[in-house]
Image (tube, rainbow, N blue to C red):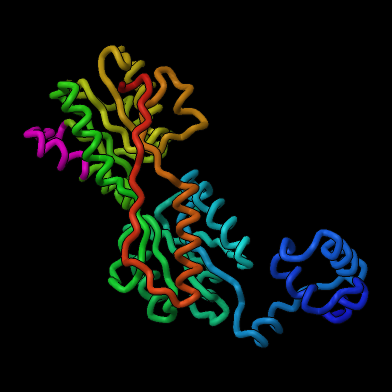
Amino acid sequence: MPNQRDVAKAAGVSTASVSRYLANPESVSPVRSKRIQKAIESLSYKVDTAAQTLKTGRSHHISIFIPGSAPFYWMIMQSIQQRLSEAGYYSSVLFTRQFDSAIPYNNSMVHKLVYSNQIEAFIIFPLLTGEDQALTNSIRRLHERVLVVDSIPEDERIPHLLFDNYGAGKQAAFEMAKKGHKKFLLLTGDDIFRSSVDRKTGFLDGLKEEGIEIPEDNIIHTSFTAAVAFPQLINSILPDFTAVLAPNDTTAIAFLRAAQMKGLSCPKDFQLVSFDNNREYSPYTTPSITSFEQPLYDAGLKVAELTLAMIEGTELPLRTTFPLKLIKRESFH
């Protein structure tokens, strides 16, 4: 089996150049890079990661646990993996839930990684469930380098990154009250998500500060998924309202359709504010949707930077918070 010395000899470069190329191709000149790549292909060279780990004590492997495949996860994952790759790390992504559901996924690989000594750090996106809290706690008992995203861990030693959905919920309440709205309809998302709970709580607290209480009949507990929310909304008897807070843009679209079928029009009969600012469709619906945007790309870069700092032994802040930005469009302006 060829090794790095064989590659270096075939390429006419030093073994140090080969090592640098394998860690980061951009660290080697374009001419040498082409020669090394050609030698690797001609020799069918494969990196012996097990040997490297034994030699250096470093695996450069970061494990990321996510509960589903919603746009939130793949959008933030893009920048996390981009930054980690630039730093010479690779990441494995594992699902902790069955396909976009609250049912725990009995993944044997999750179990193996938790008890592995080959992982340099863990990034976890836990739901508000006992299973996810237990998983996070067990990982922290075995590994020091753990970062939680979009939730608050039970273990106070674990650093975490949050989006200020609570503050955004409050802002929505203040914006609606400022426009003179008195009758509100609150659509809630799935309470296993920290973002859903914070959006709801922030909105209700904001209205309380404005001296407004929402009757229980004006709160519809629904879902982040339009396919689940729409039949529920179309079969609901809607109370009297002039302003709506939706838990995310897909549910907002489901509500707009259900309201239209009930003879209501936005923004003529009511105004609506939502969350997530899905750029694929929120600007193009009728009406276009006013929505809070989470800075997912920048947050992903920050998650990666915090993880790299943690690996280097830097003490991290316990909590890092990203504010949301309200993008105003036709549904509320």
Classify 255 as above or below 120.
Answer: above
Residue 61 can be seen in this image? yes
Quadrant of the rendered image containing residue 62? bottom right
Viewer-side residue, 320 vs 230: 320
Classify 41 as above or below 145.
Answer: above
Give the x, y percent position of residue 185.
21, 29
Q: Which residues are magenta?
A: 202-217
Measuring 25% from the left and 40% from the top, which residue is drawn there? 169
Measuring 32% from the left and 20% from the top, which residue is drawn there? 259
Classify 321 as above or below 154.
Answer: above
Quadrant of the rendered image containing residue 181? top left
- The quarter of the rendered structure image containing the C terminus is top left
Viewer-side residue, 60 vs 142: 60
Residue 262 can be seen in this image? no
Give the x, y percent position of residue 258.
35, 22
The number of discs equals 0
Classify 252 as above or below 77.
Answer: above
Give the x, y percent position of residue 142.
43, 81
Viewer-side residue, 25 vs 191: 25
The majority secondary structure of the magenta stretch comes to: helix
Give the x, y percent position of residue 261.
35, 16
Measuring 50% from the left and 61% from the top, which residue is drawn there? 304
Q: Residue furthest left?
A: 211
Residue 128 drawn in magenta:
no
- The quarter of the rendered structure image containing the N terminus is bottom right
Quadrant of the rendered image containing residue 47? bottom right
Q: Is residue 176 left or right of residue 267?
A: left
